[in-house]
Amino acid sequence: MDFEKAKKICELADKQIELCKEYQKERERAGKNKCDLDILLIAKLPEIRQQKPNVGYDMAILMLLEIEVEARAIYREMCDATAKYKGLEKLIDAHQSNISLEQSIMKYVGQGEKYGA
């Protein structure tokens, strides 16, 4: 087995673990902000229903953002965390593809040496 290839795979795997930890942090941040926004919405729902009795969730959030400065900050934070974790998902997938490619190359080269091809 090529030591340098194995070392590269280990480095890619370590980087993927770092990305996964960052993904977890951003996913938790987005979830916490969603929860905070929902709690704020629940507190303001009677006021919102006075304006629009049969309000749906999405419209209620928009109305909340219109009347509550705190909700805007929470929403912005949630959107930021969501964008970051979605970007991290793509990076994690790319690293996994790279790791799989390197493993396939090692296997192909190893079989070639084994069978004299």
Image (cartoon, grey):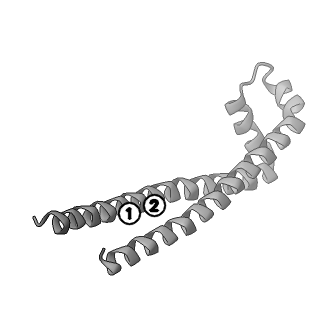
Q: Quadrant of residue 46?
A: top right
Three-letter amino acid code of the residue under disc 1: Ile
> Which residue lies under the disc numbered 2?
91
Point out residue 106 in the picture as x, y percentages from the top left corner.
Answer: 28, 66
Q: Nearer the viewer, residue 80 or 27?
A: 27
Q: Decide if residue 109 is on the left or right side of residue 2.
A: left
For the point 38% across and 63% down, the residue is: 99
Tell which residue pokes out farthest to the top in this image: 54
Q: Are marks 1 and 2 in contact (CB under 8 Å)?
A: no
Q: Decide if residue 90 is on the left or right side of residue 67.
A: left
Q: Secondary structure at mark 1?
A: helix
Q: Residues within 10 Å of mark 1 (few under 14, many from 20)?
A: some
Q: Is residue 5 above or below residue 23?
A: below
Three-letter amino acid code of the residue under disc 2: Leu
Q: Decide if residue 5 is on the left or right side of residue 34.
A: left
Q: Is residue 25 above or below residue 44?
A: below
Tell which residue pokes out farthest to the bottom in this image: 4
For the point 50% across and 65% down, the residue is: 16
Residues under labels 1 and 2: Cα distance?
A: 12 Å
Q: Quadrant of the C terminus?
A: bottom left
Q: Nearer the viewer, residue 41 or 5?
A: 5
Q: Residues within 10 Å of mark 2 (few under 14, many from 20)?
A: some
Q: Nearer the viewer, residue 37 or 15?
A: 15
Query: Viewer-nearest of labels 1 and 2?
Result: 1
| Numbered badge on residue 99 | 1
Point out residue 58 in the picture as x, y percentages from the top left corner.
Answer: 67, 32
